[in-house]
Each structure stands twice: as structure tokens, then as C-alpha cells.
Image (tube, helix red, strand yellow):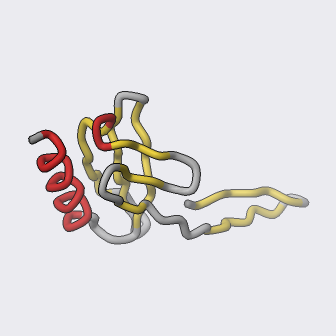
């Protein structure tokens, strides 16, 4: 996650590394738990400045995550879990 902060007329850009973890029954970050039955889709959009956006589409809403690398293998893994869960 990237945060911009202005202090005494100086802009600081602070990067925080956070993780999106896949478990047998859910996808989680530090704040949110998305159970597999709540996840509708995952998508990715190329951004600028060496990052893109991973979108987690859920029944609760859309959750964007800034990522530095293309998350194709992560999306494929999550989609595989979703297919197994729906069987």
C-alpha cells in the first residue's frame, strides 16, 4: 500500500508492504476476510509507475490492491480454489 503524507510543505511517499493470503476457505489481508462463497471474481489492470491494481470482486464490494508484479499465477490459484469450492 502506498500512502502520501504532507508535512511542513513537504510531500512524503510511504510504502507499506501488506499481504493477501489464500487459505482453504478464504482470502485475507490484515483487515478483511473474504470467504470463498463471497468472492465473485478477481481481475488485474496495468497501472503506471511500476505497479498495477489487483481487484477482488466480492458480494461485499470491490477491493483494490496495488501490486508491483503481475498477479497472474495468484489469480489462477485463487480461481482454482473457487472452482473446487463450487463443486
Q: Which quadrant of the view contains residue 48?
A: bottom left
User: 11 left or right of 77?
Assistant: right
User: 55 left or right of 4?
Assistant: left
Quarter of the figure that contains the C terminus? top left
Q: Which quadrant of the view contains residue 59?
A: top left
> Where is residue 39 drawn, in percent x and y?
30, 39
Q: Residue at x 35, y 60 (%)?
A: 22
Q: Residue at x 41, y 62 (%)?
A: 21
Residue 70 against residue 46 in the figure, above or below: below
The residue closer to the viewer here, 86 or 53, is 86
Q: Residue at x 12, y 47 (%)?
A: 83
Quarter of the figure that contains the N terminus? bottom right
Q: Residue at x 33, y 71 (%)?
A: 69
> Where is residue 55 drawn, in percent x and y?
35, 46
User: 83 left or right of 15?
Assistant: left
Count every numbered label the image shows and give the total. Answer: 0
Residue 16 against residue 57 in the figure, above or below: below
User: 12 left or right of 54?
Assistant: right
> Where is residue 61 drawn, in percent x and y?
41, 30
Question: Which residue, as the protein is rendered here, is positioned at the far left?
Answer: 87
Amino acid at each position: 500500500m502506498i500512502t502520501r503524507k504532507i508535512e511542513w510543505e513537504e510531500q512524503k511517499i510511504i510504502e507499506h508492504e501488506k499481504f493477501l493470503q489464500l487459505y482453504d476457505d478464504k482470502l485475507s489481508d490484515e483487515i478483511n476476510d473474504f470467504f470463498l462463497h463471497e468472492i465473485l471474481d478477481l481481475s488485474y489492470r496495468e497501472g503506471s509507475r511500476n505497479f498495477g491494481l489487483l481487484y477482488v470482486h466480492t458480494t461485499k464490494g470491490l477491493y483494490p490492491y496495488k501490486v508491483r508484479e503481475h498477479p497472474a499465477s495468484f489469480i489462477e490459484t485463487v480461481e482454482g480454489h473457487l472452482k473446487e469450492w463450487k463443486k
